[in-house]
């Protein structure tokens, strides 16, 4: 199944290189390198990071509703990126953008873990996430009103919906190293997450370093999600949906879902982005919808379904 | 062998005052006492989950908390396999031994959230057995079990103890403690009220619960014969 997903992601990667406004089939080198490859590589990176982060958060917090976006970690990453972007820090020093995204995501994840405390497996975690999201949104709006650029608000509205178009290879180069590092870190947590399935006491009695695992999960998620959110904006629900789609096929053992969620997230976002490019051909749309709109349209009903199943 | 000498506080309140506890290989020790007497707290301290205790080698000591359940729909075999985490191996042989000892080998591919509470409880016990530890710390191992299964599990635990392991169980069912334990430790009012053979500990247990004791002519279910 995991191999199948990897193959699917690879196939979608190739398809994504072959589809675009310039028509179907392999485009000429300029379009390939300047437009389609950056977009495709970002979709794979961002989607993979989100899928894996969702699987790790759900396992670490023992909460099927955990998702980097829902819990406000994505919002905090966006806040960090906006601060770096609109105050010209990233113009002076390009890596400041993903760094600020990581920093925001890291602070968000740390805040979340401390807010949720020992009740992480219950609904209080989601409430903590709601609080964190609201805080990040408020601070983001505040940052915009203080920003020197008057067009900031319009730009940010589009950015917040998340998009992958018009990004360059330099964006990929900025985001790739931390995302890959974060994913490598998260993939090592499988056994500890398995131990946590029976609760923190059992995990500790099995020799799982619980506090360290939660800290590493927060760090890994910040690395895997932060730079992506800084470069591609607020793409939601991928982390929530992917592990849930995989559980019926792979079983529910948290450690068994990690690698598959990485590939599954990449495949899902590649497919969603492809669909965004094809939609204007099928529907009377003036332009491509942002990919974040599509993932939210798919993900929100999914959330309702999971919430209904989880509710007592 | 597992020992603890400590005063244990929870949230500033003294739960167990100058407790001196030891359990030796070859014996099944039952911790009894009224609700809130500190039985589960003592077990958690022995498992090294409280600041007052030292964290034992997880390969040596297996701990089963009260009402342990899985967040995820793991299979029975996957739950048992968690018991191999301390050994960093997949331990197919110990897992099979554990599942067979608890009579749930045939359920191994079933999800623990889709079987009966008693079967799920056995899966949790199988997780502790799969570790093949020297010391078992089990909080209410017979809760959720019907009377026949409770006798079966207690008989198994006594066998395991008499094979040279050390088994400490928190038990509400005094009758099971009377029948299967080698030693009964009665906790009451922050201390150990009795620590002796079950028959001798009964008066202290009765006092701790505020109940009379004596021979009861009411017909009752008996453990399986033979």
Image (spheres, coloured by chain):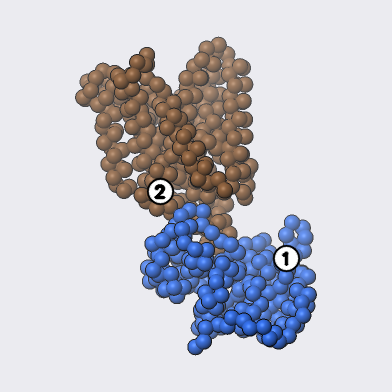
| Viewer-nearest residue: A13 or B111 | B111
Q: Position of residue A276 (x, y in %)?
A: 35, 24
Residue B85 in sight: no
> Viewed as shown, does residue A83 lie left or right of B115?
right
Asked if marks 1 and 2 fall on the same chain, the answer is no
Give above or below for B31 relative to A36.
below
Q: Position of residue A259 (x, y in %)?
A: 38, 46
Residue at the image position 74 percent from the left and 75 percent from the top: B192
Give above or below for B8 relative to A115.
below
| Viewer-nearest residue: A186 or A136 | A136
Q: Position of residue A214 (x, y in %)?
A: 54, 48
Label 1 crowd (10 A; few <14 / some 14-19 / many >=20): few
Which mark is drawn over residue B98?
none
Q: How many marks?
A: 2
Q: Quadrant of the N terminus of chain B?
A: bottom right
Residue at the image position 52 percent from the left and 46 percent from the top: A310
Give above or below for A51 relative to B34.
above
Q: Chain of mark 1?
A: B
Identify the residue position indicated by label 1 in the image: B36
Q: Position of residue A181 (x, y in %)?
A: 42, 41
Q: Mark 1: which secondary structure?
A: loop
Q: Chain of mark 2?
A: A
Q: Colour of chain B?
A: blue
Residue A252 in sight: yes
Residue B91, quarter of the rendered image:
bottom left
Residue at the image position 52 percent from the left and 41 percent from the top: A307
Which mark is drawn over residue A247?
2
Compute the Cα span from label 1 to label 2.
40 Å
Residue at the image position 52 percent from the left and 42 percent from the top: A308
Label 2 crowd (10 A; few <14 / some 14-19 / many >=20): some
Q: Colour of chain A?
A: brown
């Amino acid at each position: 199944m995991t191999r199948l997903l990897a193959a699917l992601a690879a196939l979608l990667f190739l398809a994504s290189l072959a589809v675009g406004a310039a028509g179907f089939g392999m485009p000429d080198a300029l379009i390939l390198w300047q437009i389609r490859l950056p977009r495709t590589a970002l979709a794979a990176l961002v989607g993979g990071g989100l899928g894996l982060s969702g699987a790790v958060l759900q396992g670490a917090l023992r909460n099927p509703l955990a998702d980097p976006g829902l819990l406000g970690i994505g919002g905090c990453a966006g806040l960090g990126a906006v601060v770096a972007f609109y105050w010209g820090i990233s113009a002076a020093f390009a890596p400041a953008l993903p760094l600020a995204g990581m920093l925001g995501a890291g602070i968000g994840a740390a805040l979340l873990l401390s807010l949720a405390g020992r009740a992480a497996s219950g609904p209080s975690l989601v409430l903590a996430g709601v609080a964190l999201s609201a805080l990040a949104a408020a601070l983001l709006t505040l940052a915009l009103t203080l920003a020197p650029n008057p067009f900031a608000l319009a730009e940010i509205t589009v950015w917040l919906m998340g998009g992958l178009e018009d990004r360059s290879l330099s964006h990929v180069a900025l985001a790739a190293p931390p995302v890959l590092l974060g994913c490598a870190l998260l993939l090592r947590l499988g056994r500890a997450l398995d131990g946590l399935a029976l609760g923190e006491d059992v995990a500790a009695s099995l020799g799982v370093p619980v506090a360290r695992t939660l800290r590493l999960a927060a760090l890994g998620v910040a690395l895997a999600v932060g730079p992506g959110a800084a470069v591609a904006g607020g793409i939601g629900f991928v982390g929530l949906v992917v592990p849930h789609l995989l559980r019926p096929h792979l079983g529910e053992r948290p450690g068994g879902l990690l690698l598959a969620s990485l590939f599954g997230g990449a495949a899902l976002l590649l497919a969603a982005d492809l669909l965004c490019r094809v939609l204007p051909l099928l529907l009377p749309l003036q332009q491509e919808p942002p990919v974040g709109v599509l993932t939210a349209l798919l993900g929100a009903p999914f959330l309702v379904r999971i919430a209904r199943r989880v509710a007592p | 062998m597992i020992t603890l000498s400590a005063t244990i506080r929870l949230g500033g309140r003294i739960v167990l005052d100058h407790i001196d506890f030891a359990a030796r290989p070859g014996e099944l020790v039952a911790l009894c006492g009224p609700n809130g007497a500190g039985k589960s707290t003592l077990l958690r301290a022995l498992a090294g989950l409280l600041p007052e205790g030292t964290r034992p080698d997880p390969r040596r000591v297996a701990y089963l908390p009260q009402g342990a359940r899985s967040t995820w729909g793991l299979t029975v075999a996957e739950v048992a396999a968690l018991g191999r985490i301390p050994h960093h191996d997949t331990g197919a042989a110990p897992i099979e031994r554990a599942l067979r000892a608890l009579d749930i080998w045939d359920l191994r591919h079933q999800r623990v959230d889709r079987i009966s509470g008693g079967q799920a409880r056995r899966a949790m016990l199988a997780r502790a057995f799969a570790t093949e530890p020297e010391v078992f710390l089990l909080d209410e191992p017979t809760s959720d079990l019907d009377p026949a299964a409770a006798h079966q599990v207690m008989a198994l635990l006594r066998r395991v103890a008499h094979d040279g392991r050390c088994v400490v169980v928190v038990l509400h069912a005094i009758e099971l403690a009377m029948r299967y334990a080698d030693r009964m430790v009665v906790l009451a009012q922050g201390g150990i009220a009795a620590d002796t053979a079950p028959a001798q500990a009964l008066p202290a247990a009765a006092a701790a619960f505020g109940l009379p004791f004596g021979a009861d002519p009411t017909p009752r279910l008996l453990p399986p014969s033979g």
